[in-house]
Amino acid sequence: MNDPQCESDRWWRQASADLAFLPIAEQAGKYDTCCFLAQQTAEKALKAYLFSQGEELIFTHSIFKLCDLAARYDHFFADLKETVKTLDYYHVEARYPNTLQDVIPAEFYSARDAEEAIRMATDVHRTVGERLAPPDPSGS
């Protein structure tokens, strides 16, 4: 296993890159892709946080479960999970044509779904970023 901080940084950088692409997918009307990528952003950010705490093996894709794991280190994640757990529905359903009855993800997800997914991913990303940031040496 890589150094925990190095591994955390790799996951954080990818979460940030995914987050940066979300507005492009949204503007292109790719709402299904946007929802899935929002889930991925949150998952990678939460894994970055968990790696920074010394976790080595993380076998879930569930935002709900990842927030539970993160709450062992910072209770704020227990509250966060209630506002972002809907992202779990985008891991599989937003990608595969056989997960929704009589419709494909590209036809099912809407601009409103994408907007809400982006909000949730941004909330997770911001929360993790605040906790990964090194303390301000000046104390301000």
Image: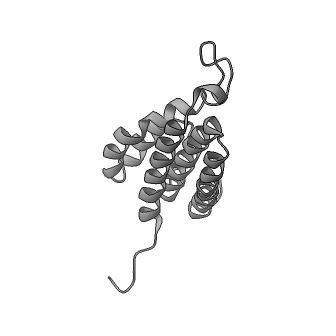
In the picture, which quadrant includes the C terminus? bottom left
Residue 137 point in image, percent of width and height: 39, 84
Q: Residue at x 60, y 52 (%)?
A: 23
Question: Could you say where residue 78 lies in the image, as x and y percent from the top left?
Answer: 33, 44
- State the image quarter where residue 58 is shown: top right
19 or 12: nearer the viewer: 19
Residue depicted at 36% across the width and 41% down the height: 83
Considering depth in this image, is 98 or 115 the residue closer to the camera? 115
Residue depicted at x 59% and y 58%: 16
Q: Is residue 82 above or below residue 107?
A: below
Residue 63 as seen in the image, left or right of residue 80: right
Residue 44 percent coordinates (x, y): 57, 49
| Residue 79 rendering spot, x and y as whole percentages | 31, 45
Q: Residue at x 61, y 43 (%)?
A: 37
| Closer-to-camera residue (111/131) | 111
- Asked whether 90 or 55 is in front, the reply is 90
How is the structure coloured here?
one colour
* Residue found farthest to the bottom: 138
Please state the total of marks drawn on the protein image: 0
